[in-house]
Image (spheres, rainbow, N blue to C red):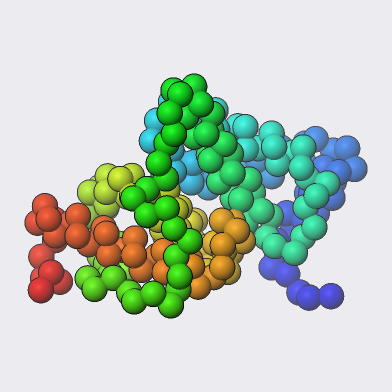
């Protein structure tokens, strides 16, 4: 049997106890992952008032779907996927209520990883992590198409690997890499346009 980290093993034990009828074990899973799920949802959903409701719905769905958790991915990755799908479902429900389709972005694409990269250089990681531009980055991140916002949120805020992001979003790993590259390029354009950063714009 493959070795697991202590955190993963502990999550797996809590899942087993929950399935055995110990609801307190699931409460511990919620406490362990609630900050990460709330953070993910808050960056994926525009309306702040919806964040708590969507996050709670995601945990409820996870509880109901727990018998399907096979353990071939980390529990957190599995939970992120449920949260992502819950966000998409809420967006679809809102679209139906408003009686119009909500566009997921200017590029309704399944990106071909073999397409030429964006001619603009992508945003360097050190800029994304800089404190002095963090607030502006959060604003511009919220303006990106859903699929770009999702990959950057999972990568930088969720600390997910390319493989884990591919699992969460159910897309090929090469597509994850393309999305991250293009999303960083779009953020770079936005920051350069407002003269937010200097020294790496040339």
* Horizontal and vertical percent position of residue 15: 79, 49
* Horizontal and vertical percent position of residue 31: 63, 41
Say whether residue 145 is left or right of residue 80.
Answer: left
> Which residue is found at the position 13% from the left and 69% from the top?
201
What residue occupies the far right of the structure in this picture?
A: 20
Q: Which of 55 and 36 is in front in this view?
A: 55
Say whether residue 82 is left or right of residue 43.
Answer: right
Say which quadrant the C terminus sits in.
Answer: bottom left
Q: How many labels does the image show?
A: 0
> Which residue is found at the position 78% from the left and 45% from the top?
66
> Which residue is found at the position 15% from the left and 71% from the top?
200
One can see residue 130 in this view? no
One can see residue 44 in this view? yes
Q: In which quarter of the image is residue 43?
A: top left
* Horizontal and vertical percent position of residue 143: 30, 45
Say which quadrant the N terminus sits in.
Answer: bottom right
> Which residue is found at the position 88% from the left and 37% from the top?
21
124 w.r.t. 50: above or below = below
* Horizontal and vertical percent position of residue 99: 45, 24
Q: In which quarter of the image is residue 189?
A: bottom left
Say whether residue 117 is left or right of residue 79.
Answer: left
Q: Nearer the viewer, residue 128 or 23?
A: 128
79 w.r.t. 192: above or below = above
């Amino acid at each position: 049997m493959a070795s697991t980290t202590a955190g993963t093993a502990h999550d797996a034990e809590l899942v087993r106890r929950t399935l055995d009828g110990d609801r307190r074990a699931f409460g511990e899973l919620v406490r362990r992952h609630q900050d990460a799920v709330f953070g993910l949802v808050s960056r994926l959903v525009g309306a702040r008032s919806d964040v708590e409701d969507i996050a709670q719905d995601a945990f409820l769905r996870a509880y109901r779907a727990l018998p399907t958790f096979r353990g071939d991915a980390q529990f957190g990755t599995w939970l992120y996927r449920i949260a992502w799908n819950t966000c998409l479902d809420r967006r679809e429900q809102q679209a139906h209520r408003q009686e119009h389709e909500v566009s997921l972005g200017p590029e309704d694409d399944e990106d071909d990883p073999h397409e030429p990269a964006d001619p603009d250089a992508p945003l360097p990681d050190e800029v994304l992590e800089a404190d002095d531009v963090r607030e502006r980055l959060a604003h511009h991140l919220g303006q990106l198409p859903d699929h770009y916002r999702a990959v950057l949120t999972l990568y930088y805020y969720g600390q997910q690997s390319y493989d884990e992001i591919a699992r969460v979003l159910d897309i090929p790993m090469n597509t994850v890499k393309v999305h991250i590259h293009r999303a960083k390029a779009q953020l770079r354009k936005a920051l350069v346009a407002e003269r937010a950063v200097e020294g790496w714009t040339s």
